[in-house]
Image (tube, rainbow, N blue to C red):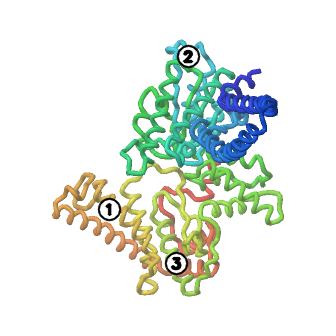
Amino acid sequence: MKKFILFIRLYWVRILITVVLISLFIGAIVFLVYGMSNYLSLEPWSRKQIAGQMAMMIPMFFFAQLFTIPFYFAMHYYFIQGGNLGKIDIQKAKVNVKWDEVIGLEEAKKEAWELVKLLKDRALLKSVGGKIIKGTIMLGPPGCGKTYLAKAIASECGLPLLPAVGSEFVGMFVGQGTARMKSLFKQARALAKMEGGCIIFIDEIDSFARPRGADTGFGGRLDMNATINQFLTEMDGLRNTENNIVVIAATNVEEHELDPAIMRAGRFDRKIHVRRPNLKEREQIFKLYLSKLKYAPSININVLARKTVNFSPAEIESMVREAGLICRRNGRDTINMKDLSDAYERVAFGLKSNVIMSDKEKLWTAYHETGHAFLYYMIHPTDDVMKATIIPRRGALGYVFARSEEERHSGDYNLLISEIKVCIAGYVAEKIKFGHTSDGVGSDFDKAMKLAQSMVWTLGMGPSGIIGSHNPAYLSEETKTKLNEDTQQILQTCLKEVEDLLRKNWEAVEHFAEQLYKKEELDYDEIEAVFNKFGIQRAKNKLSIDEESNLS
């Protein structure tokens, strides 16, 4: 019975139209039957006159319906039912994600749990003023579990979930977004009355919730403004009369990129920041996804978690799934560490390219990557080199993969200087070996220049001691010249120190480059063996892979 009432509430317009059309059809049949009896009683000349008029009117009537009926239903679809959004299947929107199944989001879960308690405990709600938090927005990078957390909130509260995507409110016709917004909240109200509550989840809300602005002349900006206004109106309407509807939104953009009116108090009162998982959370995520597959006991999950710094849960899932495919492709049913290593490269760097390099290009690339690897190993305070390769991937002819032993949230002077040295080490290695350099150093110089400029122009780390975050528009030519000189001085000092370091260890550089050229890839153990052979020590404060294993 409840489903029938909900159907009537949602589709009463369609039902009314259908009843009217059926009534008209039946009335037309009655009219024809009654008219035919009168028609036969008329004089022959009257019947001929009426027959001629009907012969003209009936085709015109049916011809008009060919245009009127499709046009009417098209307009009804776009402007009354809200287009595709009007077709949301409420029954399928219900989810069953247990709260304990949400892992890797401990901080976000703590904030979300308060909302869950208020939704579940009406007595607690009354004790804090009787008004629930009507809007909650989740902010964070993609693939970190915002949608999954919203499903868990709905499941834990026992409420149905109405899902929508922000792009569904951006339509081709003016007014379409507003109509779809009305349709969504209309369904939410009907569902809330039937189920005792409802959660609306709008993913990628930034699609329509960017700051309002003036129209550019084509009406699109005004339509988006109207969509935002309608959304705000619906949100405000919930505050006083509909305490059983909660709106949860998610976005990947920063808060300041959304319209200020949406973010003000009384609308989205709660902001949940969903961040990438830390070391402990990554271990939990690996355990979860590996538990669904058969894997070797020798796999060290702690090492995997340390290797995947800054990975999102979605990337970890993709990595484990890819490892399973690699395992099956090789005719095995048990995932090992090599499968996971290969899967990591597939996720992080992409497929191996079909680019075929000449021997000269391979040798040149080998020396370039050797320069990067040496500086990572010898001077970088946090990152340790895990792999060097000259197999092309994603447009790069080679790369050195280095990772930090833990997440970095800030950097000091020494870290920034070491980053610059690592960047220009490829350039130095090429120049020492071949006497000149290639165009492969362009991206390295670009990164090094940005780091040096940031140190001088923004962070107050220049040799001259000039401090402040500077805007060139407000500086004298003399100050700009001095800042540019500071930037170049940092680069030149780093260049000289890198050159001295590589020349001092050139025998080892030559051997490393030859091994890389010959094997095309050097893994951690092979890299470690080369440095040990020449008695080269890694930078202080960095853990070896064996030391990391012992931590687990």
Q: Is residue 121 left or right of residue 268?
A: right
Pointer 3 or 1: first along the chain: 1
Q: Is residue 104 visible?
A: no
Q: Is residue 42 left or right of residue 457?
A: right
Q: What amino acid type should be assigned to the residue bearing mark 3? A: Ala
482 versus 226 height, above or below: below
Query: For residue 453, which numbered disc appears in the image?
Result: 1
157 versus 138 height, above or below: above
Residue at image x 70%, y 25%? 8
Residue identifier under label 2: 125
The answer to whether marks 3 and 2 mark residues whose Cβ atoms lie closer than 8 Å is no
Q: Can you tell which quarter of the image residue 166 is in?
A: top right
Q: Residues within 10 Å of mark 2 (few under 14, many from 20)?
A: some
Q: Position of residue 278 (x, y in %)?
A: 56, 45
Q: Position of residue 448 (x, y in %)?
A: 39, 66
Q: CA distance from mark 3 to mark 1?
A: 33 Å
Q: Residues within 10 Å of mark 1 (few under 14, many from 20)?
A: many
Q: What amino acid type should be assigned to the residue bearing mark 2? A: Leu
Q: Secondary structure at mark 1?
A: helix
Q: Can you tell which quarter of the image residue 80 is in?
A: top right
Pointer 1 or 2: first along the chain: 2
In this view, the residue in front, 481 or 210, is: 210
In this view, the residue in front, 153 or 380, is: 153
Q: CA distance from mark 3 to mark 2?
A: 69 Å
Residue identifier under label 3: 508
The answer to whether marks 1 and 2 mark residues whose Cβ atoms lie closer than 8 Å is no
Q: What amino acid type should be assigned to the residue bearing mark 1? A: Gln
